[in-house]
Amino acid sequence: MTPRSRSLLLALCALSACAQPRPPVLHGPAPQDPESQRARSPGWPQPRAGEQADMVLVGGRVFLADSANTVAQAIALRGGTVLAVGTDAQIRALAGPQTRTVNLQGRLVTPGFNDAHVHFGSGGQNLLQVTLQGATTTAEIERRVAAAAAQAAPGEWILGRGWDQTRLPASELGPGGWPTTAPLDRAAPNNPVLLSRVDGHTSWANTAALRIAGINRQTANPSGGEVVRDPRTGEATGILKESAEGLVGRFVPEPTPAQARRGILAAMELAARTGVTSVQSDVNPTDVAVYQALRDADSLTVRIYGWFPLQKAVIDSLRARRITAPTGDEWLRLGMVKGYTDGTLGSRTAYMLEPFADDHRVRGLPQYTVAQLDSLVTAADAAGLQVILHAIGDAANRQALDAFENASRVNPAHPRRHRIEHAQVLDRADIPRFRQLGVIASMQPTHATSDMRWAETRIGHARAEEGAYAWRSLLNAGATVIFGTDFPVEPMPPVEGIYSAVTRQSREEPGVPPGGWLPSQRLTREEAIRLYTAASAIGEWQEARKGTLRPGMLGDLVVWDRDLLAIPEADILKAAPVMTVVGGRVVFERR
Protein backbone atom coordinates (compact mmCIF):
# COMPACT_ATOMS: atom_id res chain seq x y z
CA MET A 1 0.00 0.00 0.00
CA THR A 2 1.35 3.44 -0.90
CA PRO A 3 1.77 6.23 1.69
CA ARG A 4 -1.10 8.11 0.02
CA SER A 5 -3.35 5.04 0.29
CA ARG A 6 -2.52 4.77 4.00
CA SER A 7 -3.36 8.44 4.55
CA LEU A 8 -6.65 7.90 2.71
CA LEU A 9 -7.60 5.06 5.02
CA LEU A 10 -6.73 7.16 8.06
CA ALA A 11 -9.01 9.87 6.77
CA LEU A 12 -11.87 7.41 6.35
CA CYS A 13 -11.69 6.81 10.09
CA ALA A 14 -12.78 10.44 10.58
CA LEU A 15 -15.78 10.35 8.27
CA SER A 16 -18.45 9.74 10.88
CA ALA A 17 -19.31 13.42 10.66
CA CYS A 18 -20.16 12.89 7.00
CA ALA A 19 -22.23 9.84 7.69
CA GLN A 20 -25.01 11.55 9.66
CA PRO A 21 -27.65 12.54 8.96
CA ARG A 22 -28.33 10.63 5.77
CA PRO A 23 -30.63 12.56 3.44
CA PRO A 24 -33.70 10.97 1.93
CA VAL A 25 -32.91 9.40 -1.43
CA LEU A 26 -34.85 7.55 -4.08
CA HIS A 27 -33.70 3.96 -4.48
CA GLY A 28 -34.18 2.01 -7.66
CA PRO A 29 -32.89 1.88 -11.21
CA ALA A 30 -31.76 5.21 -12.62
CA PRO A 31 -34.96 6.84 -13.92
CA GLN A 32 -34.88 7.93 -17.52
CA ASP A 33 -36.98 11.06 -16.95
CA PRO A 34 -35.72 13.63 -14.42
CA GLU A 35 -39.36 14.40 -13.60
CA SER A 36 -40.48 10.81 -13.13
CA GLN A 37 -41.00 11.41 -9.41
CA ARG A 38 -43.00 14.55 -10.10
CA ALA A 39 -45.30 12.63 -12.43
CA ARG A 40 -46.31 10.37 -9.52
CA SER A 41 -46.67 13.27 -7.07
CA PRO A 42 -50.19 14.36 -6.06
CA GLY A 43 -49.07 17.97 -6.52
CA TRP A 44 -46.50 20.53 -5.54
CA PRO A 45 -46.28 21.64 -1.91
CA GLN A 46 -48.30 24.81 -1.33
CA PRO A 47 -47.36 27.65 1.04
CA ARG A 48 -49.21 27.56 4.36
CA ALA A 49 -51.61 30.38 5.07
CA GLY A 50 -49.69 33.47 6.12
CA GLU A 51 -46.30 31.95 5.25
CA GLN A 52 -43.83 34.60 4.07
CA ALA A 53 -40.81 34.19 1.85
CA ASP A 54 -37.24 35.08 2.70
CA MET A 55 -36.67 36.15 -0.92
CA VAL A 56 -38.88 36.64 -3.94
CA LEU A 57 -37.64 37.09 -7.51
CA VAL A 58 -40.26 38.63 -9.77
CA GLY A 59 -40.62 40.09 -13.25
CA GLY A 60 -38.60 37.55 -15.16
CA ARG A 61 -38.61 34.08 -16.70
CA VAL A 62 -38.08 31.17 -14.32
CA PHE A 63 -37.12 27.97 -16.15
CA LEU A 64 -37.89 25.07 -13.85
CA ALA A 65 -35.86 22.50 -15.85
CA ASP A 66 -38.69 19.99 -15.67
CA SER A 67 -39.59 17.70 -18.55
CA ALA A 68 -42.44 20.05 -19.55
CA ASN A 69 -40.00 22.97 -19.96
CA THR A 70 -42.17 24.98 -17.57
CA VAL A 71 -41.44 28.71 -17.43
CA ALA A 72 -42.95 30.87 -14.67
CA GLN A 73 -42.77 34.61 -13.99
CA ALA A 74 -41.51 34.51 -10.44
CA ILE A 75 -40.20 32.35 -7.62
CA ALA A 76 -40.17 32.52 -3.80
CA LEU A 77 -37.60 31.00 -1.41
CA ARG A 78 -37.92 30.25 2.28
CA GLY A 79 -35.73 28.36 4.69
CA GLY A 80 -33.28 27.35 1.98
CA THR A 81 -35.88 25.76 -0.31
CA VAL A 82 -38.28 26.78 -3.05
CA LEU A 83 -41.51 27.98 -1.45
CA ALA A 84 -43.51 28.63 -4.62
CA VAL A 85 -43.34 29.46 -8.32
CA GLY A 86 -46.01 31.27 -10.25
CA THR A 87 -47.12 34.65 -11.53
CA ASP A 88 -45.74 37.92 -10.24
CA ALA A 89 -48.96 38.56 -8.33
CA GLN A 90 -48.92 35.13 -6.69
CA ILE A 91 -45.31 35.44 -5.59
CA ARG A 92 -45.52 39.08 -4.47
CA ALA A 93 -48.32 38.02 -2.14
CA LEU A 94 -45.76 35.92 -0.25
CA ALA A 95 -43.50 38.90 0.52
CA GLY A 96 -43.45 40.36 4.01
CA PRO A 97 -41.58 43.15 5.80
CA GLN A 98 -38.37 41.06 6.05
CA THR A 99 -38.53 39.62 2.53
CA ARG A 100 -35.90 40.62 -0.02
CA THR A 101 -37.56 41.39 -3.34
CA VAL A 102 -35.45 41.08 -6.48
CA ASN A 103 -36.78 42.65 -9.68
CA LEU A 104 -35.48 40.40 -12.42
CA GLN A 105 -36.20 42.97 -15.13
CA GLY A 106 -36.99 40.20 -17.59
CA ARG A 107 -33.92 38.09 -16.81
CA LEU A 108 -33.82 34.30 -16.90
CA VAL A 109 -33.63 32.17 -13.75
CA THR A 110 -32.48 28.53 -13.93
CA PRO A 111 -31.71 25.92 -11.30
CA GLY A 112 -28.15 26.05 -10.01
CA PHE A 113 -25.86 24.00 -12.20
CA ASN A 114 -24.64 20.65 -10.91
CA ASP A 115 -21.28 19.81 -12.46
CA ALA A 116 -21.34 16.02 -12.51
CA HIS A 117 -17.60 15.58 -13.06
CA VAL A 118 -14.95 17.94 -11.70
CA HIS A 119 -11.65 17.77 -9.89
CA PHE A 120 -12.54 20.54 -7.48
CA GLY A 121 -9.68 20.51 -4.99
CA SER A 122 -6.88 19.86 -7.47
CA GLY A 123 -8.52 22.27 -9.92
CA GLY A 124 -8.42 24.93 -7.24
CA GLN A 125 -4.74 24.20 -6.74
CA ASN A 126 -4.21 24.58 -10.50
CA LEU A 127 -5.71 28.06 -10.32
CA LEU A 128 -2.80 28.95 -8.02
CA GLN A 129 -0.11 27.29 -10.20
CA VAL A 130 1.34 27.91 -13.67
CA THR A 131 -1.56 28.11 -16.10
CA LEU A 132 -0.69 26.88 -19.59
CA GLN A 133 -4.09 26.88 -21.31
CA GLY A 134 -3.96 28.73 -24.60
CA ALA A 135 -0.19 28.47 -25.08
CA THR A 136 0.61 27.93 -28.76
CA THR A 137 4.43 27.84 -28.67
CA THR A 138 7.00 26.23 -26.43
CA ALA A 139 8.54 29.70 -26.04
CA GLU A 140 5.34 30.90 -24.39
CA ILE A 141 5.35 27.91 -22.04
CA GLU A 142 9.02 28.55 -21.28
CA ARG A 143 8.23 32.18 -20.45
CA ARG A 144 5.42 31.26 -18.05
CA VAL A 145 7.52 28.64 -16.27
CA ALA A 146 10.47 31.02 -16.02
CA ALA A 147 8.23 33.65 -14.40
CA ALA A 148 7.18 31.10 -11.76
CA ALA A 149 10.75 29.95 -11.20
CA ALA A 150 11.83 33.55 -10.60
CA GLN A 151 9.48 33.63 -7.59
CA ALA A 152 10.43 30.19 -6.26
CA ALA A 153 13.23 29.14 -3.94
CA PRO A 154 15.96 26.92 -5.41
CA GLY A 155 14.80 23.29 -5.35
CA GLU A 156 11.11 24.21 -4.98
CA TRP A 157 8.78 22.32 -7.30
CA ILE A 158 7.24 24.28 -10.19
CA LEU A 159 3.83 22.80 -11.01
CA GLY A 160 1.38 23.66 -13.73
CA ARG A 161 -1.29 22.37 -16.06
CA GLY A 162 -2.95 22.95 -19.39
CA TRP A 163 -0.39 22.45 -22.17
CA ASP A 164 -1.58 20.71 -25.32
CA GLN A 165 0.95 19.44 -27.84
CA THR A 166 -1.67 19.55 -30.61
CA ARG A 167 -1.56 23.36 -30.35
CA LEU A 168 2.26 23.57 -30.63
CA PRO A 169 4.18 23.83 -33.93
CA ALA A 170 5.41 20.44 -35.09
CA SER A 171 8.88 21.94 -35.58
CA GLU A 172 9.11 22.53 -31.80
CA LEU A 173 8.28 18.96 -30.84
CA GLY A 174 10.54 15.98 -30.33
CA PRO A 175 10.13 12.20 -30.59
CA GLY A 176 6.57 11.02 -31.07
CA GLY A 177 5.32 14.56 -31.55
CA TRP A 178 5.89 15.50 -27.90
CA PRO A 179 7.86 18.36 -26.29
CA THR A 180 11.17 17.65 -24.59
CA THR A 181 12.96 18.66 -21.41
CA ALA A 182 14.95 21.41 -23.14
CA PRO A 183 12.62 24.44 -22.77
CA LEU A 184 11.82 23.54 -19.17
CA ASP A 185 15.52 23.13 -18.35
CA ARG A 186 16.17 26.62 -19.70
CA ALA A 187 13.20 28.09 -17.82
CA ALA A 188 14.00 26.54 -14.44
CA PRO A 189 17.57 25.24 -14.21
CA ASN A 190 17.45 25.21 -10.39
CA ASN A 191 13.99 23.76 -9.87
CA PRO A 192 12.20 20.51 -10.66
CA VAL A 193 9.27 21.11 -13.02
CA LEU A 194 6.22 18.92 -13.58
CA LEU A 195 3.48 20.12 -15.93
CA SER A 196 0.28 18.17 -16.47
CA ARG A 197 -1.19 18.01 -19.95
CA VAL A 198 -4.63 19.56 -20.38
CA ASP A 199 -6.27 16.13 -19.99
CA GLY A 200 -4.37 15.27 -16.80
CA HIS A 201 -3.16 11.93 -18.20
CA THR A 202 0.33 12.90 -19.41
CA SER A 203 3.01 14.92 -17.64
CA TRP A 204 5.98 16.89 -18.92
CA ALA A 205 9.02 16.99 -16.63
CA ASN A 206 12.37 18.71 -16.79
CA THR A 207 15.74 17.04 -16.25
CA ALA A 208 15.85 18.02 -12.57
CA ALA A 209 12.54 16.25 -11.92
CA LEU A 210 13.63 13.14 -13.83
CA ARG A 211 16.86 13.08 -11.85
CA ILE A 212 14.97 13.25 -8.51
CA ALA A 213 12.83 10.31 -9.63
CA GLY A 214 15.88 8.34 -10.76
CA ILE A 215 14.53 7.94 -14.30
CA ASN A 216 17.21 6.88 -16.78
CA ARG A 217 17.71 4.59 -19.77
CA GLN A 218 17.28 1.52 -17.55
CA THR A 219 13.92 2.61 -16.07
CA ALA A 220 11.21 0.17 -17.14
CA ASN A 221 7.75 1.29 -18.17
CA PRO A 222 5.26 0.72 -15.35
CA SER A 223 2.13 -1.34 -16.00
CA GLY A 224 -0.37 0.88 -17.81
CA GLY A 225 2.13 3.65 -18.48
CA GLU A 226 4.97 4.77 -20.71
CA VAL A 227 8.16 6.78 -20.35
CA VAL A 228 8.63 8.36 -23.78
CA ARG A 229 12.22 8.00 -24.98
CA ASP A 230 14.46 9.34 -27.70
CA PRO A 231 14.75 6.41 -30.13
CA ARG A 232 18.37 7.34 -30.93
CA THR A 233 19.72 7.51 -27.36
CA GLY A 234 17.14 5.70 -25.22
CA GLU A 235 17.04 8.69 -22.85
CA ALA A 236 13.75 9.87 -21.37
CA THR A 237 12.40 12.93 -23.19
CA GLY A 238 10.44 14.25 -20.20
CA ILE A 239 7.03 12.92 -21.28
CA LEU A 240 5.35 10.49 -18.87
CA LYS A 241 2.07 8.83 -19.87
CA GLU A 242 -0.64 7.52 -17.53
CA SER A 243 0.79 5.48 -14.62
CA ALA A 244 4.32 6.64 -15.51
CA GLU A 245 3.32 10.07 -14.20
CA GLY A 246 3.55 8.60 -10.74
CA LEU A 247 7.27 7.89 -11.13
CA VAL A 248 7.83 11.63 -10.68
CA GLY A 249 4.54 12.63 -9.07
CA ARG A 250 5.23 10.64 -5.91
CA PHE A 251 8.08 13.03 -5.13
CA VAL A 252 5.89 16.14 -5.33
CA PRO A 253 4.89 17.26 -1.82
CA GLU A 254 1.19 17.02 -0.98
CA PRO A 255 -0.52 20.40 -0.45
CA THR A 256 -0.54 21.46 3.19
CA PRO A 257 -3.97 21.94 4.80
CA ALA A 258 -3.55 25.69 4.38
CA GLN A 259 -2.69 25.31 0.69
CA ALA A 260 -5.61 22.92 0.17
CA ARG A 261 -7.96 25.42 1.79
CA ARG A 262 -6.72 28.23 -0.47
CA GLY A 263 -7.27 26.07 -3.53
CA ILE A 264 -10.77 25.05 -2.48
CA LEU A 265 -11.71 28.65 -1.70
CA ALA A 266 -10.47 29.67 -5.16
CA ALA A 267 -12.55 26.92 -6.77
CA MET A 268 -15.60 27.91 -4.69
CA GLU A 269 -15.29 31.51 -5.83
CA LEU A 270 -15.09 30.39 -9.45
CA ALA A 271 -18.12 28.11 -9.02
CA ALA A 272 -20.21 30.88 -7.45
CA ARG A 273 -19.51 33.42 -10.18
CA THR A 274 -20.16 30.92 -12.98
CA GLY A 275 -23.45 29.53 -11.62
CA VAL A 276 -22.27 26.16 -10.27
CA THR A 277 -24.01 25.24 -7.01
CA SER A 278 -23.17 21.50 -6.76
CA VAL A 279 -20.17 19.47 -7.84
CA GLN A 280 -19.36 15.78 -8.02
CA SER A 281 -15.63 15.48 -7.49
CA ASP A 282 -12.71 13.41 -6.36
CA VAL A 283 -11.80 13.99 -2.73
CA ASN A 284 -8.73 13.26 -0.68
CA PRO A 285 -8.23 13.27 3.10
CA THR A 286 -7.13 16.89 3.31
CA ASP A 287 -9.96 18.08 1.07
CA VAL A 288 -12.59 16.26 3.15
CA ALA A 289 -11.30 17.94 6.31
CA VAL A 290 -11.47 21.36 4.63
CA TYR A 291 -15.02 20.76 3.37
CA GLN A 292 -16.13 19.61 6.82
CA ALA A 293 -14.63 22.70 8.46
CA LEU A 294 -16.24 25.03 5.92
CA ARG A 295 -19.60 23.29 6.31
CA ASP A 296 -19.43 23.47 10.10
CA ALA A 297 -18.61 27.19 9.85
CA ASP A 298 -21.55 27.71 7.45
CA SER A 299 -19.03 28.84 4.83
CA LEU A 300 -19.43 26.14 2.20
CA THR A 301 -20.99 27.71 -0.91
CA VAL A 302 -21.16 24.62 -3.13
CA ARG A 303 -22.57 21.17 -2.43
CA ILE A 304 -20.07 18.30 -2.68
CA TYR A 305 -20.58 14.66 -3.61
CA GLY A 306 -17.16 13.05 -3.41
CA TRP A 307 -15.50 9.94 -4.76
CA PHE A 308 -12.53 7.98 -3.49
CA PRO A 309 -10.28 5.69 -5.57
CA LEU A 310 -11.58 2.28 -6.62
CA GLN A 311 -9.22 0.24 -4.44
CA LYS A 312 -9.88 -2.89 -2.41
CA ALA A 313 -8.63 -1.30 0.83
CA VAL A 314 -10.88 1.72 0.31
CA ILE A 315 -13.92 -0.48 -0.41
CA ASP A 316 -13.28 -2.48 2.76
CA SER A 317 -12.87 0.66 4.86
CA LEU A 318 -16.06 2.26 3.54
CA ARG A 319 -17.99 -0.97 4.09
CA ALA A 320 -16.70 -1.20 7.67
CA ARG A 321 -17.97 2.32 8.35
CA ARG A 322 -21.32 1.61 6.67
CA ILE A 323 -20.76 4.32 4.11
CA THR A 324 -22.85 3.59 1.04
CA ALA A 325 -24.12 5.70 -1.84
CA PRO A 326 -24.94 8.40 -0.89
CA THR A 327 -24.02 9.00 2.76
CA GLY A 328 -23.96 12.48 4.24
CA ASP A 329 -26.05 15.62 4.36
CA GLU A 330 -27.15 18.16 1.76
CA TRP A 331 -23.71 19.80 1.71
CA LEU A 332 -21.19 16.97 1.86
CA ARG A 333 -21.80 13.37 0.86
CA LEU A 334 -19.71 10.34 0.01
CA GLY A 335 -20.31 6.88 -1.41
CA MET A 336 -18.71 6.88 -4.87
CA VAL A 337 -15.54 5.11 -5.91
CA LYS A 338 -13.81 5.78 -9.21
CA GLY A 339 -11.53 3.71 -11.39
CA TYR A 340 -9.70 4.47 -14.64
CA THR A 341 -10.04 1.92 -17.43
CA ASP A 342 -7.85 3.80 -19.93
CA GLY A 343 -6.28 7.15 -20.81
CA THR A 344 -7.22 9.81 -23.35
CA LEU A 345 -7.54 10.32 -27.10
CA GLY A 346 -5.18 13.28 -27.11
CA SER A 347 -2.37 11.18 -25.65
CA ARG A 348 -3.30 8.09 -27.70
CA THR A 349 -3.71 6.18 -24.45
CA ALA A 350 -7.48 5.61 -24.81
CA TYR A 351 -8.16 1.86 -25.08
CA MET A 352 -9.55 1.16 -28.56
CA LEU A 353 -11.06 -1.89 -30.23
CA GLU A 354 -8.99 -1.12 -33.33
CA PRO A 355 -5.65 0.76 -33.65
CA PHE A 356 -5.52 4.53 -33.86
CA ALA A 357 -5.97 5.89 -37.36
CA ASP A 358 -2.80 7.97 -37.06
CA ASP A 359 -0.68 5.30 -35.37
CA HIS A 360 -1.50 1.73 -36.34
CA ARG A 361 1.00 0.36 -33.83
CA VAL A 362 -1.10 1.16 -30.74
CA ARG A 363 -4.59 0.65 -29.33
CA GLY A 364 -4.01 2.62 -26.12
CA LEU A 365 -3.17 1.68 -22.56
CA PRO A 366 -5.80 -0.34 -20.64
CA GLN A 367 -5.40 0.14 -16.91
CA TYR A 368 -6.92 -3.15 -15.70
CA THR A 369 -7.16 -6.73 -16.83
CA VAL A 370 -10.72 -8.00 -17.17
CA ALA A 371 -10.31 -10.04 -13.99
CA GLN A 372 -8.95 -7.08 -12.01
CA LEU A 373 -11.79 -4.75 -13.01
CA ASP A 374 -14.48 -7.38 -12.48
CA SER A 375 -13.18 -8.11 -9.00
CA LEU A 376 -13.08 -4.45 -7.93
CA VAL A 377 -16.46 -3.52 -9.41
CA THR A 378 -18.17 -6.58 -7.94
CA ALA A 379 -16.73 -5.87 -4.48
CA ALA A 380 -17.77 -2.21 -4.57
CA ASP A 381 -21.23 -3.08 -5.86
CA ALA A 382 -21.70 -5.62 -3.08
CA ALA A 383 -20.74 -2.91 -0.56
CA GLY A 384 -23.53 -0.63 -1.80
CA LEU A 385 -21.14 1.87 -3.33
CA GLN A 386 -21.69 3.79 -6.55
CA VAL A 387 -18.97 2.83 -9.02
CA ILE A 388 -17.90 5.34 -11.64
CA LEU A 389 -15.41 4.33 -14.32
CA HIS A 390 -13.38 6.65 -16.54
CA ALA A 391 -13.66 5.25 -20.07
CA ILE A 392 -12.66 7.07 -23.26
CA GLY A 393 -12.03 4.46 -25.96
CA ASP A 394 -14.63 2.06 -27.33
CA ALA A 395 -12.77 -0.93 -25.88
CA ALA A 396 -12.59 0.72 -22.45
CA ASN A 397 -16.31 1.52 -22.52
CA ARG A 398 -17.10 -2.08 -23.42
CA GLN A 399 -14.89 -3.36 -20.63
CA ALA A 400 -16.65 -1.03 -18.16
CA LEU A 401 -20.12 -2.11 -19.29
CA ASP A 402 -19.06 -5.76 -19.08
CA ALA A 403 -17.82 -5.23 -15.51
CA PHE A 404 -21.13 -3.65 -14.47
CA GLU A 405 -23.06 -6.46 -16.13
CA ASN A 406 -20.92 -9.03 -14.35
CA ALA A 407 -21.54 -7.38 -10.97
CA SER A 408 -25.30 -7.37 -11.52
CA ARG A 409 -25.14 -11.05 -12.40
CA VAL A 410 -22.92 -12.08 -9.47
CA ASN A 411 -24.44 -9.95 -6.69
CA PRO A 412 -28.04 -9.96 -5.44
CA ALA A 413 -30.39 -7.41 -6.96
CA HIS A 414 -30.30 -3.99 -5.27
CA PRO A 415 -30.59 -0.32 -6.29
CA ARG A 416 -27.70 0.63 -8.60
CA ARG A 417 -26.66 3.82 -10.35
CA HIS A 418 -23.21 3.04 -11.65
CA ARG A 419 -21.72 5.43 -14.17
CA ILE A 420 -19.26 5.67 -17.00
CA GLU A 421 -17.36 8.94 -16.93
CA HIS A 422 -16.84 10.47 -20.39
CA ALA A 423 -18.24 7.60 -22.52
CA GLN A 424 -16.36 9.39 -25.25
CA VAL A 425 -16.06 6.86 -28.09
CA LEU A 426 -18.65 4.08 -28.23
CA ASP A 427 -19.14 1.13 -30.52
CA ARG A 428 -22.68 1.29 -31.90
CA ALA A 429 -23.54 -2.10 -30.35
CA ASP A 430 -22.78 -0.79 -26.86
CA ILE A 431 -25.02 2.29 -26.93
CA PRO A 432 -28.25 0.39 -26.01
CA ARG A 433 -26.46 -1.38 -23.16
CA PHE A 434 -26.42 1.80 -21.05
CA ARG A 435 -30.21 1.69 -20.66
CA GLN A 436 -30.32 -2.09 -20.46
CA LEU A 437 -27.85 -2.13 -17.56
CA GLY A 438 -29.07 1.10 -15.91
CA VAL A 439 -25.60 2.66 -16.39
CA ILE A 440 -25.45 6.46 -16.42
CA ALA A 441 -23.37 8.21 -19.10
CA SER A 442 -21.56 11.13 -17.41
CA MET A 443 -20.38 13.32 -20.29
CA GLN A 444 -18.65 16.66 -20.81
CA PRO A 445 -19.86 18.53 -23.90
CA THR A 446 -16.82 20.82 -24.06
CA HIS A 447 -14.64 17.78 -24.71
CA ALA A 448 -16.31 17.48 -28.11
CA THR A 449 -15.63 21.07 -29.13
CA SER A 450 -12.07 20.98 -27.77
CA ASP A 451 -11.22 17.66 -29.41
CA MET A 452 -12.95 18.07 -32.77
CA ARG A 453 -9.81 19.75 -34.19
CA TRP A 454 -8.01 16.41 -34.18
CA ALA A 455 -10.45 13.68 -33.07
CA GLU A 456 -11.01 12.30 -36.58
CA THR A 457 -7.24 12.25 -37.11
CA ARG A 458 -7.03 9.90 -34.12
CA ILE A 459 -9.98 7.60 -34.85
CA GLY A 460 -11.16 8.34 -38.41
CA HIS A 461 -14.51 9.70 -39.57
CA ALA A 462 -16.39 6.40 -39.49
CA ARG A 463 -15.67 5.70 -35.82
CA ALA A 464 -16.39 9.34 -34.92
CA GLU A 465 -19.74 9.30 -36.70
CA GLU A 466 -20.70 5.97 -35.16
CA GLY A 467 -20.31 6.94 -31.53
CA ALA A 468 -18.02 9.84 -30.64
CA TYR A 469 -19.37 12.26 -28.01
CA ALA A 470 -22.75 10.75 -28.86
CA TRP A 471 -25.07 12.19 -26.23
CA ARG A 472 -28.04 12.39 -28.62
CA SER A 473 -27.64 8.75 -29.61
CA LEU A 474 -27.53 7.73 -25.94
CA LEU A 475 -30.63 9.78 -25.11
CA ASN A 476 -32.48 8.33 -28.09
CA ALA A 477 -31.59 4.86 -26.83
CA GLY A 478 -33.16 5.69 -23.46
CA ALA A 479 -29.99 6.17 -21.45
CA THR A 480 -29.63 8.64 -18.60
CA VAL A 481 -27.04 11.27 -19.63
CA ILE A 482 -25.63 13.80 -17.19
CA PHE A 483 -23.34 16.74 -17.91
CA GLY A 484 -20.22 18.19 -16.32
CA THR A 485 -16.98 19.87 -17.35
CA ASP A 486 -14.03 17.80 -16.07
CA PHE A 487 -12.61 21.06 -14.66
CA PRO A 488 -9.70 21.87 -14.75
CA VAL A 489 -9.36 19.84 -17.97
CA GLU A 490 -12.05 22.15 -19.39
CA PRO A 491 -13.28 25.53 -18.13
CA MET A 492 -15.89 25.48 -15.37
CA PRO A 493 -18.48 27.95 -16.79
CA PRO A 494 -21.56 25.90 -17.76
CA VAL A 495 -22.32 28.24 -20.66
CA GLU A 496 -19.40 26.73 -22.56
CA GLY A 497 -20.95 23.29 -22.17
CA ILE A 498 -24.41 24.49 -23.16
CA TYR A 499 -22.99 26.13 -26.27
CA SER A 500 -21.01 22.99 -27.12
CA ALA A 501 -24.00 20.68 -26.69
CA VAL A 502 -26.31 22.92 -28.72
CA THR A 503 -23.97 23.88 -31.59
CA ARG A 504 -21.06 21.39 -31.60
CA GLN A 505 -19.03 24.30 -32.96
CA SER A 506 -15.73 25.84 -31.94
CA ARG A 507 -15.76 28.01 -28.83
CA GLU A 508 -12.75 29.88 -30.20
CA GLU A 509 -14.31 30.45 -33.63
CA PRO A 510 -18.09 30.44 -33.11
CA GLY A 511 -19.93 29.17 -36.17
CA VAL A 512 -17.13 26.78 -37.21
CA PRO A 513 -17.82 24.30 -38.69
CA PRO A 514 -21.12 25.44 -40.20
CA GLY A 515 -23.95 23.34 -38.79
CA GLY A 516 -21.64 21.78 -36.20
CA TRP A 517 -19.34 18.77 -36.04
CA LEU A 518 -21.38 15.57 -36.30
CA PRO A 519 -24.53 17.71 -36.04
CA SER A 520 -26.94 14.81 -35.53
CA GLN A 521 -25.78 14.80 -31.89
CA ARG A 522 -26.89 18.40 -31.20
CA LEU A 523 -29.31 19.10 -28.34
CA THR A 524 -31.87 21.80 -27.70
CA ARG A 525 -31.01 24.46 -25.12
CA GLU A 526 -33.66 23.15 -22.75
CA GLU A 527 -32.21 19.65 -23.00
CA ALA A 528 -28.67 20.88 -22.36
CA ILE A 529 -29.72 22.80 -19.25
CA ARG A 530 -31.70 19.83 -17.90
CA LEU A 531 -28.71 17.50 -18.36
CA TYR A 532 -26.65 19.95 -16.26
CA THR A 533 -29.33 20.25 -13.54
CA ALA A 534 -32.20 17.77 -13.26
CA ALA A 535 -30.28 14.87 -14.79
CA SER A 536 -27.07 15.56 -12.85
CA ALA A 537 -29.10 15.23 -9.66
CA ILE A 538 -30.07 11.70 -10.76
CA GLY A 539 -26.36 10.94 -11.09
CA GLU A 540 -25.97 11.53 -7.34
CA TRP A 541 -29.33 10.11 -6.11
CA GLN A 542 -30.67 13.58 -5.35
CA GLU A 543 -33.46 14.24 -7.86
CA ALA A 544 -35.95 14.42 -4.97
CA ARG A 545 -34.04 17.35 -3.46
CA LYS A 546 -32.47 19.38 -6.25
CA GLY A 547 -32.12 19.83 -9.98
CA THR A 548 -35.43 21.57 -10.67
CA LEU A 549 -37.11 24.65 -9.21
CA ARG A 550 -40.39 23.05 -8.26
CA PRO A 551 -41.66 23.85 -4.73
CA GLY A 552 -39.97 21.92 -1.96
CA MET A 553 -36.64 21.58 -3.79
CA LEU A 554 -33.42 23.12 -2.49
CA GLY A 555 -33.21 26.84 -3.21
CA ASP A 556 -30.23 26.67 -5.56
CA LEU A 557 -30.65 28.99 -8.55
CA VAL A 558 -28.90 31.31 -10.97
CA VAL A 559 -30.06 34.64 -12.41
CA TRP A 560 -28.53 35.22 -15.85
CA ASP A 561 -27.65 38.50 -17.53
CA ARG A 562 -29.30 37.31 -20.75
CA ASP A 563 -31.85 34.70 -21.74
CA LEU A 564 -30.02 31.45 -22.53
CA LEU A 565 -33.19 30.10 -24.15
CA ALA A 566 -33.64 32.94 -26.64
CA ILE A 567 -30.37 34.69 -27.49
CA PRO A 568 -28.40 33.89 -30.66
CA GLU A 569 -26.30 30.76 -30.25
CA ALA A 570 -22.97 32.59 -30.39
CA ASP A 571 -24.10 34.83 -27.52
CA ILE A 572 -24.51 31.85 -25.18
CA LEU A 573 -20.75 32.03 -24.59
CA LYS A 574 -21.11 35.64 -23.42
CA ALA A 575 -23.82 34.91 -20.85
CA ALA A 576 -22.88 35.20 -17.18
CA PRO A 577 -24.65 35.06 -13.82
CA VAL A 578 -25.70 38.26 -12.09
CA MET A 579 -26.69 36.29 -8.99
CA THR A 580 -26.05 32.79 -7.67
CA VAL A 581 -28.08 31.46 -4.75
CA VAL A 582 -27.30 28.27 -2.80
CA GLY A 583 -29.75 27.09 -0.17
CA GLY A 584 -31.57 30.41 -0.32
CA ARG A 585 -28.36 32.35 0.41
CA VAL A 586 -26.78 34.69 -2.14
CA VAL A 587 -23.20 33.49 -2.70
CA PHE A 588 -22.47 35.70 -5.71
CA GLU A 589 -23.98 38.96 -6.88
CA ARG A 590 -22.77 41.23 -9.66
CA ARG A 591 -23.78 44.78 -9.02
Image (tube, rainbow, N blue to C red):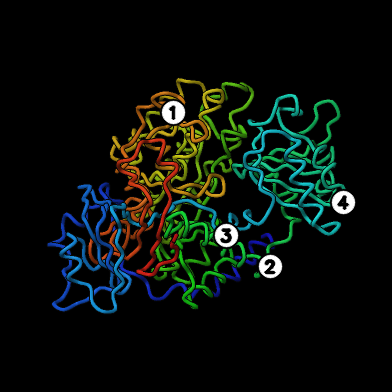
Upstream in sequence: badge 3 or badge 1: 3
Give the residue number, with chain letter if any, for mark 2.
256
Give the residue number, with chain letter if any, for mark 4.
190
Mark 1 vs mark 2, CA separation in Å: 45 Å
The front one of 446 and 174 is: 446
Residue depicted at x 64% and y 41%: 224
Residue depicted at x 26% and y 55%: 60
- Asked if marks 3 and 2 touch (Cβ < 8 Å), the reply is no
Of circles 3 and 1, which is in front? 1
Image check: 530 left or right of 500?
Answer: left
Mark 3 vs mark 2, CA separation in Å: 12 Å
SS at circle 1? loop
Upstream in sequence: badge 4 or badge 3: 3
Residue 109 position, x and y percent, is 31, 55
SS at circle 3? helix
Mark 4 vs mark 3, CA separation in Å: 28 Å
The front one of 27 and 264 is: 264
Upstream in sequence: badge 4 or badge 2: 4
Residue 78 position, x and y percent, is 28, 72
Indicate which disc residue 121 carries: 3
Give the residue number, with chain letter if any, for mark 1.
511
Amino acid type of disc 1? Gly
Residue depicted at x 52% and y 57%: 270
Amino acid type of disc 2? Thr
Upstream in sequence: badge 1 or badge 2: 2
For residue 153, above or below residue 345:
below
Of circles 4 and 2, which is in front? 4
